[in-house]
Image (cartoon, helix red, strand yellow):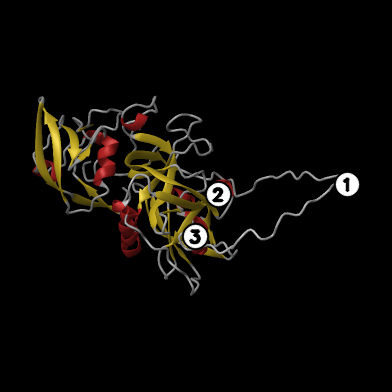
Amino acid sequence: VGAGGVGAGSGWGTTYQQPEPKSGRGRGGLLAAVLIAALVAGGLGGGLGYTLAKNDENTSSTTVSASDSGGSLKRDPGTVAGVAATALPSTVTIQAESSAGEGGTGTGFVFDKEGHILTNNHVVADAVDGGKLTATFPNGKKYDAEVVGHAQGYDVAVIKLKDTPGNLKPLTLGNSDKVAVGDSTIAIGAPFGLSNTVTTGIISAKNRPVASSDGTGSNASYMSALQTDASINPGNSGGPLLDAQGNVIGINSAIQSAANGLGGTSQSGSIGLGFAIPINQAKYVAEQLIKTGKPVYAKIGASVSLEDTTDGAKITEQGASGSDAVEAGGPADKAGLKPGDVITKLDDRVIDSGPTLIGEIWTHQPGDKVTITYERDGQTRTVDVTLGSRTGDS
């Protein structure tokens, strides 16, 4: 996109019209680019009401005691309880509040011993400009924190505890490229403000194209996501998705909402379709944010349509604000790509829309060489493209 990456506009952060939510179709019954609401807690603050039913003191009852010899209570390391016991102490509940007092609850986890916490951008966005940020561990200890760096496009952020304790234990990172459909998953977070909640499921799909809005209509993140049926709700955002051994394989980031269809922004609950940013990508982004404070995106230097389609990613005739759709001297230009070309594959990955292409490109790093398959004048062609780079969200 002009000086930016692939997308509609002259750079990330440029206002563009996102595709309207429509009835599902295409791969797996979902839209070619799944447009869903990011998991924000929207000021829930963890407050839930409870009603306790009390028995009349004069009511008599007969109590029969059960046997207290139910077997060993030892939780082996390979069990869900064992994984949760190990991972919970390294997971935090994040409270983000803007200078105007608005904010919500999310989750994060310990990335290193220096006090860096990995989470979603949309979890901490309210606290970026003069807001307040706190991270609370399961033992009740609360720490003030500050945003080290955030990436809107990736929906990844790194925060740092201001008074870093000396006993931090970073969670072990797995290899999301090796994850298989059917693998067991364990999610930890604060759904609807209920901190330290553990849920389980499986990987139900991989490489799911997801475009998730931050709710403002001007920013979106694109990812080639891990899909899980583990129960994920608002407040789980930024929390770890673990494999059966307790390794982090993803960051829980979005759900499909059944309330308003795809793109709904209501606080509806899980319907078994949760999406996580693969940890291999999140790790790379986090390292860049810690190093420079700014994200680095791979790009092909072409503007593509964000309209809902299953035909491919079409290079637009014109970029934003009258700019060229194909950046002069950029990777796409050097490879001979032109406006009107429809990209259908990136390496072996089928590309069915612009958002899908963006998500797939962003799984790569600048300098990577990829093979682009595209259609022009009814003919299918292939070309090798060396990805360029863009720093920052604007």
The percent coordinates of residue 284 (x first, y second) are: 30, 58
The residue under label 1 is 60
Of all residues, the one furthest to the bottom in this rendering is 166
Q: Position of residue 177 (x, y in %)?
A: 29, 52
The secondary structure type at the circle numbered 3 is strand
Q: Residue at x 42, y 31 (%)?
A: 262
The label on residue 100 is 2
Q: Is residue 1 left or right of residue 95?
A: left
Whether residue 269 is visible here, answered yes or no, is yes
- Amino acid type at circle 1 is Ser
The nearer-to-camera label among 2 and 1 is 1
Residue drawn at the location 51% of the way across and 44% of the way down: 234
Q: Which mark lies nearer to you, 1 or 3? A: 1
Alpha carbon separation for disc pair 2 and 1: 54 Å
Nearer the N terminus, badge 2 or badge 3?
A: 3
Would you name the residue on which mark 3 appears? 91
Residue 294 visible (yes or no): no
Helix or strand or loop: what does disc 1 sit on? Answer: loop
Query: In which image quadrant can residue 205 be found?
Result: top left
User: From the viewer's perspective, is the residue at label 2 or at label 3 nearer?
Assistant: 3
Amino acid marked by disc 2:
Ala
Task: Check whether the beta carbons of the residues at disc 2 and disc 3 lie within 8 A of each other.
Answer: no
Report the Cα–Cα distance between label 2 and label 3. 27 Å
**Alpha-carbon span between mark 1 and mark 3:** 45 Å
Across and down, in percent, residue 79 comes to: 48, 58
Give the crowd class for mark 2: few <14, some 14-19, many >=20 residues within 10 Å. Answer: few
**Local SS, label 2:** loop
Q: Residue at x 28, y 38 (%)?
A: 356
Residue 160: percent from left, percent from top: 44, 64
Q: Nearer the viewer, residue 103 or 247?
A: 247
